[in-house]
Image (cartoon, grey):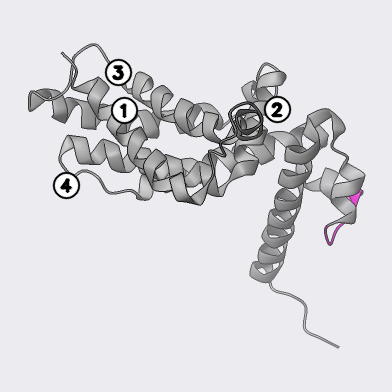
Amino acid sequence: MAAPSSEAERQRDKERTRADILAVATREFADKGYTGARVDEIAARTSTTKRMIYYYFGGKEQLYIAVLERAYSALRASEKQLDVEHLDPEDALRQLAALTFDHHEANPDFIRLVSIENIHHAEHLSRSEILAGLADPALGGITRILERGRKAGLFREDVDALDVHMLISSFCVFRLANRHTFQAIFGRDMLDPGRREHYRAMLGTLLIEYLTAR
């Protein structure tokens, strides 16, 4: 008879199962929205059962909130890993903008989830117990960069960290969320690899030109 699993092994199995459920649920909610997604379908595409999903998360809404938390946490984690304190303020903001550009492009499901949650007026997101705390580190980093830029006489005084975050996010989200309608109307694919570096540089230049405008 095989030896019983250790507590550490059971915990690793639990974490792997939970991660598997979240990965599949992310695609299900991104593809079908909150209303259209089915827990039965998520269970069928994972190595678990509907009952086990409810055991781990409590219900469909709690699973959906966990998916949103995972998506936002991944972005915040990538921002934390970006070391810009040693860069001059302009380069620091360009790198932050480029990181967001790259992250959103690599994670189209994140954009779709954000769009879906906006349709629901953020009613599920507002019930998360951790997402509110995720904003502070991101805005804190931008605030420090802006302060350094102002001290050096580079940046205008009437722009705060949330303004900068909104500007970066709006460009990156628009490029993904409106790709198909933009192409249908104007005949241009904003995700065309040949234009990628052009748009990536455009975002950084727009940000810096605005912050340095007198």
* Left or right placement of residue 213 versus residue 9 in this view: left
Residue 183 is one of the magenta-drawn residues = no
Q: Nearer the viewer, residue 144 or 155?
A: 155
User: Within 10 Å of the Cα at label 1, are there few (<14), some (14-19), or many (20+) other Cα atoms?
Assistant: some
Range covered by the magenta-colored residues: 46-51
Q: Which residue is mark 4?
A: 86
Of label 4 and label 1, which has the lower sequence position? 4
Q: CA distance from mark 2 to mark 3?
A: 28 Å
Q: Give me the residue at 18% from left, 22% from top.
A: 212
Comparing labels 4 and 1, the label whose residue is closer to the camera: 1
Q: CA distance from mark 2 to mark 1?
A: 28 Å
**Snapshot quadrant of residue 87:** top left
| Residue receiving disc 1 | 206
Q: Which image quadrant: the C terminus?
A: top left
Secondary structure category for the residue under label 2: helix
Residue lying at the far front in this picture: please name it. 187
Residue type of the residue flagged with mark 1: Leu
Residue 196 vertical placement versus 138 (above, below): below
The kind of secondary structure element at disc 4 is loop
Residue 98 at x, y percent in the picture: 37, 43
Q: Which mark is residue 160?
A: 3
Q: Amino acid at mark 2?
A: Ile
Among numbered discs 4 and 2, the one appearing first in the sequence? 4
Image side of residue 50 versus residue 205, left or right: right
Q: Position of residue 81 (x, y in %)?
A: 36, 50
Q: Secondary structure at mark 3?
A: loop
